[in-house]
Every structure is written in C-alpha cells, then in structure tokens.
Image (spheres, helix red, strand yellow):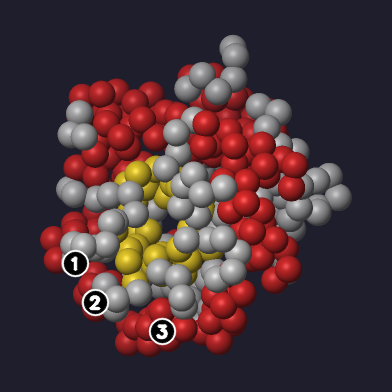
Amino acid sequence: MTKRLSGCGTALVTPFGTHGAVDIGSLARMVNWQLDEGVDFLVPCGSTGEAATMSLEEHVRVVTQTAEIASGRVPIVAGAGSNDTHRAVVLTRELCTSGATHLLHVTPMYNKPPQRGLIDHFRTIADASPLPIILYNVPSRTGINMLAETTLALAEHPNILGIKEASGDLGQIVEILRHRPDRFSVLSGDDALTLAVIAHGGDGVISVISNVTPNLMSELVARARAEKMTGAREIDNRLRPWMRAAFIESNPIPVKAALGLMDRITPTLRPPLVPLAESHIPTLVAALVAVGALRA
C-alpha cells in the first residue's frame, strides 16, 4: 500500500513585497518557521497563495523555491489547478521538475462542468502527470460540488492519491471515508471541521490558520490522529476564535494581516484583494492574543 499523505499541511501564503513582487526572503523564513514548528507538509500556490494572480514563471518559481528551502524535509503539494483542462496539464508538466512531490488540482471554477466532466478533467490530468494528484473540492470558491461518488470513481485511478475536501458537508466526507481505497488520503479543507474529519477516520488537514499557528494546528492533528481526543478538543477550543477571525473577510486577507502584525511578512495582497477592513482589526488582534500569536 502506498503511504497516505497525512498530518497538518499549511496552505502557504505567498509573501509579496510592497510593490507586489514575490518576496523570496520572506518565503524562505515562512517555510523554515513552519517546519521548525512541526508542520507535516507544505502547499504552495493554492488559493491561499494567490496563485490566480501569478504568472506561470512566478508560479513555478514559488514552488521551486519552496521545495529547495524545504530540502526534502516534508512533502510539497503544489497547487496546479485551472478551469481549462489543457492549461492544467501544461502547468502540471511545468511543475513536475520543480521539486514538488504531489500536485493539488481544484475542481474547475466558473464553467461548472457536470460530474462526468469532472471525471474526464481529473483523469486527463492524472494520465499526463508523473507526480501523484490530490483533488481539491471547494464549492464556495468554484461554484460546483464534487459528489462523493465522483470522488470515489476518481480514487480508482492509480495516480490520484487523495482529496482536500472543503465542501463543508461532513456527511459527504464520511461517505468518501467509508468507501475509499486504502491508499487514498482524505484531508479536511476546512480548519473548523478538522477534528470531526479525523474522528471519522480522515488523515489530516490542509490548513489556512496554520500559517499563523503552525505548532498548535500540528499538535491538534497529531493528538486527534493518535486518538487523544481530550487534548485535541482542548486545542480546538483554544483555536476557535482564530478560526473565526481568519475568515472574517476573504482568505487570505485576514491571515496576511495577522502575519503582518506578527512581523512575519509584509501583508501585501494582489488586486482585486484589498487590505483587511480597519473595523475588523480589533477582532483579529483579540484572536491572535488568545492563541498566543501576539502579546496582549
């Protein structure tokens, strides 16, 4: 059996300088800090990484630099999604020499294919990829939900090894868990559902909030996977204010604002994203103080 991808993976922000260029120095510091804090794998160039605003050259560069900085310490699951199947295949092939170990492919946004179209899309990508594929279902961003039976049909493909499930539908996720092949990872795509997904047999999370609280989120996942649920619930309860604040506006606006307050990065966003509204700053600061990310 192929070892399943598991644990806490951080959906990395992409640091940009004040003029919008990729800030490789801040990226290196983020990657090393995440790994020092115990994160199990890294996910550059997803929606949290603002990949939709990157050129192909920037996208490949960020993944390559992330892999070089990580230097084999953890898996690198590179975002490679597109709503154009041909472009997704092109990006997949470009990233196969980047140092990534897996590629994350999201359901196509905007054009909303039927379920049989999703199957064709992902099978075409998986057939073309030398690297294993992790599916990503996130209806709140794409406008389409990939049903459990579609995910399970795709799980039969030998090069599709898991899913980041962010449908918010625990029943759907449990159905996948009940019938998946042994080699197929099921990772929560919602920080707030992580504990529940693992309790039902899931393998971990691809987390937004671990950008700011990598040690706490990694510890929550480790305790839950070890069936130490009392300790896992304690951490989950502690993190709840930050989980709420992290999505008070569109991701990654709040998480970049938090990292800016912590002096981890310059909190530059690429348009059409804009800085966090001033009215939300007190809520954000209170949540960061509550989890120990900022001093009172």
Residue closer to the observer: 145 or 256: 256
Q: Is residue 214 visible?
A: yes
Q: Residue at x 52, y 31 (%)?
A: 36
Q: Which residue is mark 2?
A: 156
- Mark positioned earlier in the residue sequence (1 or 2): 2
Q: Residue at x 75, y 42 (%)?
A: 25
Image disc number at residue 181 = 1
Badge 3 element: helix
Residue closer to the observer: 20 or 223: 223
Badge 1 element: loop
Residue lying furthest top: 296
Badge 1: few (under 14), some or many (20 or more) residues near its Cα, within 10 Å? some
Q: Where's residue 196, x and y in %?
A: 24, 43
Q: CA distance from mark 1 to mark 2?
A: 7 Å
Q: Amino acid at mark 3?
A: Asp
Relative to 120, 195 lies left or right: left
Q: CA distance from mark 2 to mark 3?
A: 13 Å
Q: Where's residue 45, x and y in %?
A: 59, 59
**Picture quadrant of residue 112:** bottom left
Badge 2: few (under 14), some or many (20 or more) residues near its Cα, within 10 Å? some
Establish if 283 lies above or below 276.
Answer: above
**Picture quadrant of residue 192:** top left
Q: Where's residue 182, x and y in %?
A: 18, 62
**Picture quadrant of residue 44:** bottom right
Image disc number at residue 127 = 3
Establish if 59 lies above or below 285.
Answer: below
